[in-house]
Amino acid sequence: MHAKQIGEYLNASPGGDRLTSHAACLIALRRVLAEALPEPLQRSCAIANYKQGKVIFLADNSAVAARLRLLAPSLMQLLGQRGLDVTGMKVDVQPDARRRTQPLEEKSLLLSSSACGALARAAESLPDGALRQAVDALARRGNRR
């Protein structure tokens, strides 16, 4: 028995064809706009959706939103030339929208040697269990700098 591709499941489910065509349209929009927009502007905005012929952008701030609104006529013309049916553009400001979708960096714990020693002593005084293990792990992790 072979593993099925995700596309096979989507095509077999009711409404799956709409989902795949919508996803393909969003991908096509993103590709065209990645070519058309300058690099700083690409990093400061994202395509949120496409519905009823309207492309919906999320901009990190009002300056980016204003720039996108100025570029809207030429972007719509370019999208039309590439065969995408775009009748309008909407730009919403949502600060740090792209950053929230990226994984957060793991924060490092910096403890002094006296704090690590105090945690180790506290772990020794606790009865065996989850709390003791957690305090002990914290003390050991703080020692690694």
Image: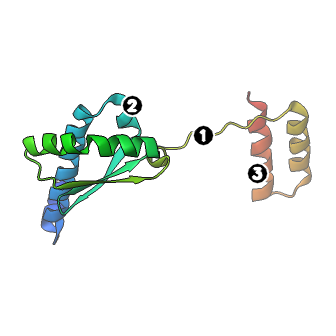
Which residue is at 39% across, 36% downward?
Answer: 43
In the rendered image, which residue does mark 3 sit on? 133
Residue 73 or 52: which is nearer the viewer?
73
Q: Residues within 10 Å of mark 3 (few under 14, many from 20)?
A: some
In the rendered image, which residue does mark 1 sit on? 106
**Mark earlier in primary sequence (2, 1):** 2
Quadrant in the rendering for residue 104: top right
**Mark earlier in primary sequence (2, 3):** 2
Contact (Cβ within 8 Å) of mark 2 with mark 1 = no
- In this rendering, the answer to whether 54 lies above or below 37 is below
Q: Describe the element under mark 1 as helix, strand or loop.
A: loop
Q: Point out residue 20 in the picture as x, y percentages from the top left corner.
A: 17, 57
Which residue is at 75% across, 58% downward?
Answer: 130
- In this rendering, the answer to whether 9 lies above or below 78 is below
Q: Point out residue 108 in the picture as x, y percentages from the top left corner.
A: 68, 36
Q: Describe the element under mark 2 as helix, strand or loop.
A: helix
Image side of residue 121 versus residue 42, left or right: right
Q: Give the quadrant of the C terminus.
A: top right
